[in-house]
Image: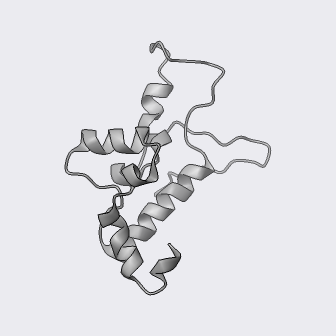
Amino acid sequence: CDFGESKVYGPDEDGYTTRNRGTEFMKSPEMLTVANASSKERSTYDRRKKVGANKSCDVWGFACLLYELLTAQFLFFDDDWIRFFIRVTSSTCAEDLLPKERLAPLLAAPGGALV
């Protein structure tokens, strides 16, 4: 249930949004940084660059939700929110983003070798 938060874009629209809604530990890196990226006062602001969330962020959120349903844990949870934010928004290596202890429940499940 999205409580009226969803948006529908036409086939000719890029479909970027800057609305920052949702559970922090399920947000995509783009949604976590959208407030800073769209701020005109920042020195890194570029009006030509598209900022915000699109369909790929929906896939990210769905994967996080699916992981939570299967394991009863957040996929990217960290007790330290700053450490979580830095790990998700600046990670370039999958091992840094997904520690082995987060993958272990999936690998132990039937068919987990396919992960």
Quadrant of the image occupied by residue 77:
bottom left
| Residue at position x 58%, y 18% in the image | 46
> Most extreme residue toward the left, as rendered?
79
| Residue at position x 40%, y 76% in the image | 107
> Residue 16 location, x and y as percent?
62, 39
- Asked if residue 1 can be seen in this view, the reply is no
Instruction: Tell whether 96 sits left or right of 11.
Output: left
| Residue at position x 47%, y 48% in the image | 28
- Colouring rule applied to residues: one colour
Quadrant of the image occupied by residue 54:
top right
> Residue 37 location, x and y as percent?
49, 27
> Most extreme residue toward the right, as rendered?
12
- Depth check, front residue: 93 or 1: 93
Instruction: Tell whether 17 sits left or right of 39.
Output: right
- Depth check, front residue: 45 or 78: 78
- Vertical comparison of 56 with 85: above or below: below
- Asked if residue 52 can be seen in this view, the reply is yes
> Residue 48 location, x and y as percent?
66, 21
> Residue 9 location, x and y as percent?
69, 47
Instruction: Tell whether 19 sits left or right of 70.
Output: right
| Residue at position x 29%, y 67% in the image | 73
- Vertical comparison of 63 with 45: above or below: below
